[in-house]
Amino acid sequence: MQRILLADDHSFIRLGLIQLLQDEYPSAEIKEVADGNALIKEVMNEEWDLVISDLDMPGKTGLEALEQIKLLKPELPVLILSIFPEDLYAVRVLKAGAAGYMNKNAAPEELITAVQRIKLGRKYITPEIAEKLLETPASEKKPHELLSNREFEIFKMLASGKTTSQIAEALSLAPTTVSTHRSRVMEKLSLSTNAELTRYAITHHLISDV
């Protein structure tokens, strides 16, 4: 790995990841950015061997950035890091083209294991993810697993108590667009209020019970 692009909105996380990577790859050039928009800009303007991106960032999320990167440079491997458990996002990001998904609570050496596997042209997939990737008939999927990536993001934000205008600002969308997605989410989950969305999300461990 000669050139690595690292995206995370927390500077202390970036510093820790850079230290781990430089210990293993002392000659690598590592550049850091703090949000999804800057990540896309760097991918467009420079050539990279690997992107390591947080999932939850200001502006474009890691998932949105991943989808755009795969359109711009399909062969560029992207490793997604997240605080969210594997069963919540791993399948989504891998199907979107990620080279791997790693929980931030994993042991530090797992990052190097993931990078080494990706360097060989393979995907970093834990046994748990591999099992989830085995196609489950749609009839056996939970309702929230049938949401699109955008719908799922908006669903989680609504369930966490954010208003339509707050979501629109965070995702750079028109409020009417958010409202349209909200209606689709409600229909797919057979729910009618934000309070029901929150209860559903807590019941399925999609957000914390606060």
Image: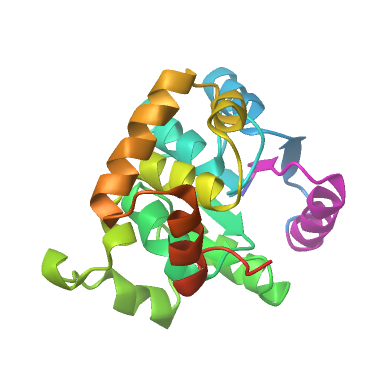
Q: Main secondary structure of the magenta part?
A: helix
Whole-percent x, y for residue 35 in the image: 68, 33
Is residue 64 or residue 163 the one in the foreground? 163
Please tell me whether residue 65 belongs to the stretch shown in magenta: no
**Quick check: 46 left or right of 199?**
right
Q: Position of residue 197 (x, y in %)?
A: 44, 55
Q: Residue at x 56, y 39 (%)?
A: 61
Task: Say whether residue 28 is left or right of residue 182.
Answer: right
Image label count:
0
179 lies above or below 51: above
The x and y percentages for residue 27 are: 76, 48
Is residue 119 or residue 53 the one in the foreground?
53
Q: Residue at x 50, y 55 (%)?
A: 195
Residue visible at 85% across and 51% down in the picture: 15
Q: Is residue 125 left or right of residue 37?
A: left
Of the pair 185 and 1, the residue shown nearer to us:
185
Q: Tell me residue 145's x, y (percent).
A: 31, 60
Residue 105 is at least partly visible in this image: yes
Q: Which residues are magenta?
A: 2-24
Asked if residue 189 lies left or right of residue 37, the reply is: left
Q: Residue at x 73, y 56 (%)?
A: 25
For the question of whether residue 123 can be seen, the reply is: no
> Which quadrant of the figure has residue 116?
bottom right
Q: Quadrant of the C terminus?
A: bottom right
Image quadrant where residue 49 sits: top right
